[in-house]
Amino acid sequence: MMRRIRAVRAGRSPSRRTVTALAIGAALTLAATACGGAGDSTASGAKDGFTQAPQSAGPLTVWVDSTRLAAAQLYQKQNPAVKMDIVTYDGDANGSNYLQTKVSLFNRTGNGWPDVVFSSQNNEATWAVTARFAAPLNKGLLPPSLLAGWALNANQPCMVDGTIYCLRNDLAQTVLWYNAALMTQWGYQVPTTWEQYKALGEKVAREHPGYLVGVAGDTFAPEIYLWAGKCGANHITGPKAVTVNTTSAACTRMASLLDDLIAAKSMSTSSVFSSDFDKNEADKILMMPGPSWYGGSLFQGTFKAPKGQVAVAPMPHWSDDATPAVGNVGGGTWLLSAHSTHLKAATDFLTWVTTSDDYQGKVAVGYPAYAPAAKTWLANQAASGYYANDITAPLQSAAGQVWPDWGYGQFSQEAIWAATVTPGLTAGKTIVSLLPAWQKAIANYARSDGYEVTQ
């Protein structure tokens, strides 16, 4: 059975609102009762780290977005004996907060919670634990041997005081995508440092006007460039504490690089998802830093780049930085409701949808967060023959290099960038000149969500 609910969207940021929050897990110190007690009025007792609701034989209710609908349908096909009520919603895309709003309503009425839900956001734990919605997963529901299979730090956005409250679906680690044919034809070397990247961008502007080495026009541009450049714009240091410093040397250096390439006209200020970019610039890409999902979704899907053209290399790093870092643009999470009256069925589905080769390894569009499935996924990418080189090593390395000090708060960095930096960039201002305004906006948004801000 499949239902569809209309989720009213709010905010202005890409559906793959990204992020990787590490500090939040270590710093949050919530009492066990903050996540226990869900469904206390009908509770049958504490088990697996929370007070569980009485169990029943009704249908398993699963909420998914349109992309993950295929996962729920495949599970239903493979498990016809499982009664399922599959509901499609917006997946909290664009920072809509639809799930949080509905959970708040369900908490007031005492019913309606889905058993398992997918979110395109990685920061749901910032509210789902205190709202007593998310069930703890590493207190008995899932074995440690299974949880150990996720990529390094992949589930950190789900960690609260040592307890895991969700599972990461996919990673969105950044790498350097490039046109292998043009690089060879023009005799260029793939840059390994940001200094080389900038120099090549300026050379391309002179020798091949109109061709691009990157795109800075999307609201997740800071997650590609500034995150990888270790800009401390979004350092979550506690459950309601954040340090914001967008005018540091690290931030200014990367912003200056972008400004220089924008001025040279080898860095686009359009969005890669705009019809204008697709029509006028998509075939002019020499290089483009971006997340792992760019390969299938963007180059193969949207741009229709021919087979054997697109290749992958590691993200550049500053020559004086001994520890290369990458950014992250997306990757969703799965949550299991602490109110579920079908915990066995819910746990079975959650395990399958996050680890199964049949879905994660062979069907999922993004790089699986579960490492064994990622190997299958990479093997399938290689077998397709689409890419000009073996993309395995760069993606695997980047999966463990996401810089940990760019955190997850309830506020959307992409919405802030869209409201603060994008209009200025469109008006011809430099990113460096907009960094103070960006910092002020982050601080204001964070305080409005109850954060203590250090600047």
Image (cartoon, helix red, strand yellow):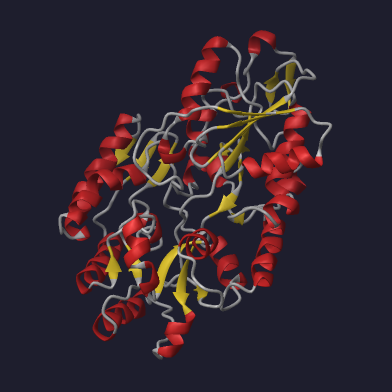
Residue 110 higher or lower than 291, as above or below: above
Looking at the picture, how far across and down is residue 26, in whole percent?
52, 42
Left-right relation of 414 to 15: left
Query: In what quadrant of the picture does the C terminus appear?
Result: top left
Looking at the picture, how far across and down is residue 344, in whole percent?
78, 29
Left-right relation of 148 to 153: right
Residue 403 higher or lower than 163, as above or below: below
Residue 409 visible here: no
Pick out the residue farthest to the front.
279
Residue 445 higher or lower than 151, as above or below: above
Residue 192 higher or lower than 329, as above or below: below
Residue at image point 29% right, 69% down = 267
Looking at the picture, how far across and down is residue 70, in whole percent?
65, 44
* Front residue of 307 and 383: 307
Residue 17 visible here: yes
* Front residue of 103 and 47: 103
Pick out the residue farthest to the right.
81
Looking at the picture, how far across and down is residue 73, in whole percent?
70, 40
The quadrant holding residue 412 is top left
The quadrant holding residue 452 is top left
Left-right relation of 120 to 116: left
Q: How many numbered dots are placed on residues in this image?
A: 0
Query: In what quadrant of the picture does the N terminus appear?
Result: top right
Left-right relation of 105 to 276: right
The quadrant holding residue 429 is bottom left
* Front residue of 171 and 70: 70
Pick out the residue farthest to the top.
41
Residue at image point 33% right, 42% down = 415
